[in-house]
Image: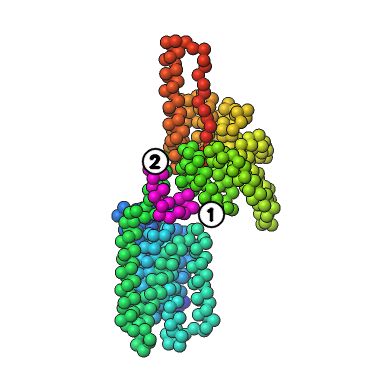
Amino acid sequence: MSQRSLFDSWNETPVTWGLIALHFALYGLMVSQAPVVTRETLRAFGGQFNPDIWSGETYRVVLAGLLHGSFLHVVMNNISLYVLGRLLERLLGSSAFATLYVLALLAGNVASLHFIPPMVVSVGASGAIMGLAGALFVLLLLDQRGRFLVTRPSGRYMFFAFVIFYLLFGKFVPIINNAAHVGGFVMGGLFGLYFWSRIPGENLPRWLGTGILIASVAGLTLMATRGIKPTGTYAWHFYHGLEAFYKGNTEDARRQLLLARHQQETPRVLNYLGQLSFQTQNYKDAATYFGQLQKQKPEHLGLWYYLIKSLHKSQQSAQAKQMFEKASKQLAEREKSRSMFEDATRKNQELQYYWAHLYAANHQDKQALLLYQKLLDQDPNNINLHNEIAWLLVTANNPEYRNPVLAEKHARFAVDRSPKSSATFLDTLATALFAAGKTREAIKVMRQAIQAKDAKDVMPHLHYQLRRFEKSIHPQKRRAASTRKAPSNNPASRPSTRKVLAR
């Protein structure tokens, strides 16, 4: 592009070029402050984190649409903005184009207030850009005579197909905020109808176009008002349930998650209710939740462990064995369905790992230990395997296979060689120490586990364990006092160590 044509383009489409410059400037500012862009970086710079908006930071609804999560993200979005913006800004005029862009951005992010999980941080201009695509989509449909947009029929159909594909693609890719895409697209389409009504000689009355725009803005305002203060909604209860879960507040977490489930029974709610029940040893409820979740996600191998273990622990062993048979068939089928692009050795190890988990869940302690040991022989420094072996040596259903001393050795190996403090590893070590009668040391290690950065997903379990360890001290003190007053030949029994950690 020559200097003259670039100057002309800037004069004809100043809003488009201004937005592109703003996007790159904000991205440059962000990476200059934080070269490695993380979820917390995006949140700190104004990304859309819905709980922050609920707390009054409403500016995020706008600012999130100007930020981007990576260099590729900002480049790809602005290529799309350049292509669509140059066309539509010339057609609509800069004022109408700017209005369309702002409305689509707001519509996409307001839709995100209602439809994305509350713990997600969302950024990007794609909602607004999909608004441009929505307006162009409607204008191409209405302008069949080509009065304003001269294109080949094949070009129109390719554009229609691409937009529909992109919307469908976003539905199945977890990292894409498709709520913003759909919200922006719908608002853009409605604005396209409004603009068409302003063209003399066309068959859409001006009053109808005006009514469409007013209704669109009114609907957006109502959705925004409800989204900014969503008290009593699914998202509200789910978020507060997670917050309580991550802090180990079991009762608050259960109450909020049950209220969320009453609003909408999603896999996420069932999973957290199952985890909460499992981690606090309420196995009957855990079996119910994981059973419902397994029906919704039958291909999820990790769920079988929780379901089978919960059934056994809640005295439903016959049903647990049936579930084990189903899980075994599914795992055997997974072994057969190997892709030519997969690493056969790595996949075999992963599947053996799953087998060991299934055996442990089904109280087949010997088979599980042998398989874990086989995997450990292949990879002696694998800290995850050391941790799994330690855990099974403490929690084995058959007392014959419990060995707290050996469990402590494996657990210390995992803790000492972990590059960062792991709540799961520390929990295993604390449980081994408790089983070995080293209660005070176990309490100290468990408190370290609670402080670990990765503790939030197992926080209810960690607090449950800490309370159990601390309670065991008081009976020991009473027994010691009783022994001093009246010696007894009955030895103090070791506290039970049966429990299962949510992995």
Q: Secondary structure at mark 2?
A: helix
The amino acid type of the residue labelled 1 equals Gln
Q: Nearer the viewer, residue 130 or 296?
A: 296
Per the picture, the main secondary structure of the magenta-coloured stretch is: helix
**Eyeballing the image, is 76 above or below 262?**
below
Tally of numbered discs:
2
Looking at the image, tell me whether mark 1 or mark 2 is earlier in sequence order. Answer: 2
Left-right relation of 323 to 86? right
Q: To which quarter of the image does residue 483 belong?
A: top left
Residue 52 belongs to the span the image colors magenta: no
Q: CA distance from mark 1 to mark 2?
A: 26 Å
Q: Nearer the viewer, residue 138 or 294?
A: 294
Q: Nearer the viewer, residue 265 or 303?
A: 265
**Eyeballing the image, is 366 above or below 292?**
above
Residue 7 seen anywhere in this rendered image of the structure: no
**Label 1 crowd (10 A; few <14 / some 14-19 / many >=20):** few
The amino acid type of the residue labelled 2 equals Glu
Left-right relation of 338 to 143? right
- Tell me where residue 79 appears, x and y as whole percent: 47, 70
Q: Which residues are magenta?
A: 249-270
Residue 258 seen anywhere in this rendered image of the structure: yes
- Tell me where residue 240 appears, x and y as whole percent: 37, 48
Label 1, on which residue? 296
The residue lying at 43 percent from left, 31 percent from top is 467
- Tell me where residue 187 appears, x and y as whole percent: 38, 71
Q: Find residue 362 and name its label.
A: none
